[in-house]
Amino acid sequence: MRRIPLVSALVLGLVLGLGLAVQAKDMTADDLVKEAKSQITEISPEQAKKCLDQGGYLCLDCREDKEYKMGHVPGAINLPRGLVEFKIDKKIPNKEANILVMCKTGGRACLTCRALNRMGYKKAVNIAGGWQAWEKAGYPIE
């Protein structure tokens, strides 16, 4: 008699798992970024520059190490997108910190902001257009 509930639970878990897999399979990376963008705050590179100039803000660059080494916002903290959830609490333990997130064009930063917000970093915002927009504006780089 105990086998029936166990089998039912396994079947239910399999059905739910397949449902989630189908749902995720139907989304592209662009869809995930678009969804994240609708749930985060974005600011222009001009606004980000003003924030950094006034102080009290951290810049989190979520590009890969190689990209970061080619040039970055002065003082930016590098934490690649794939490691953010695992290492953010060591790099930025203060969940009340004002964090400006940047990647190359904005996609990875949108996903990073969403993850940070979900982890309790409510003041993490994306810099629209990312590194390319920052560089194009002629803002300082290291």
Image (cartoon, rainbow, N blue to C red):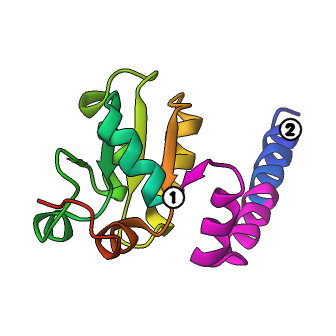
| Residue name at image x 70 percent, y 62 percent | 35
Magenta residues span 15-43
| Image-based side of 47 in relation to 17, left or right | left
SS of the residue under disc 2: helix
Dots 1, 2 in contact, CB < 8 A = no
Q: Is residue 65 above or below residue 4?
A: below
In x, y percent, where is residue 126? 50, 53
Q: Which residue is mark 1?
A: 44
Amino acid tagged 1: Ser
Q: Quadrant of the N terminus?
A: top right
Q: Is residue 56 above or below residue 13?
A: above
> Residue 23's quadrant in the figure?
bottom right
| Image-based side of 24 in relation to 105, left or right | right
| Residue name at image x 43 percent, y 31 percent | 98
In x, y percent, where is residue 108? 45, 64
Amino acid tagged 2: Pro
Query: Mark 2 packing: few (<14 Cα in 10 Å), some, or many (20+)?
Result: few
* Residue 59 vs residue 31, the one in the foreground: 59
In x, y percent, where is residue 73? 23, 55
Q: Is residue 29 above or below residue 39?
A: below
Q: Which residue is mark 2?
A: 5
Q: Is residue 135 magenta?
A: no
Main secondary structure along the magenta-highlighted residues: helix
Looking at the rendered image, the disc whose residue lies closer to the viewer, 1 or 2, is: 1
| Image-based side of 34 in relation to 1, left or right | left
In x, y percent, where is residue 49? 36, 50
SS of the residue under disc 1: loop
| Residue name at image x 75 percent, y 65 percent | 18
Q: Mark 1 vs mark 2: which is more N-terminal?
A: 2
Q: Is residue 34 magenta?
A: yes
Query: Mark 1 packing: few (<14 Cα in 10 Å), some, or many (20+)?
Result: some
Q: Quadrant of the C terminus?
A: bottom left
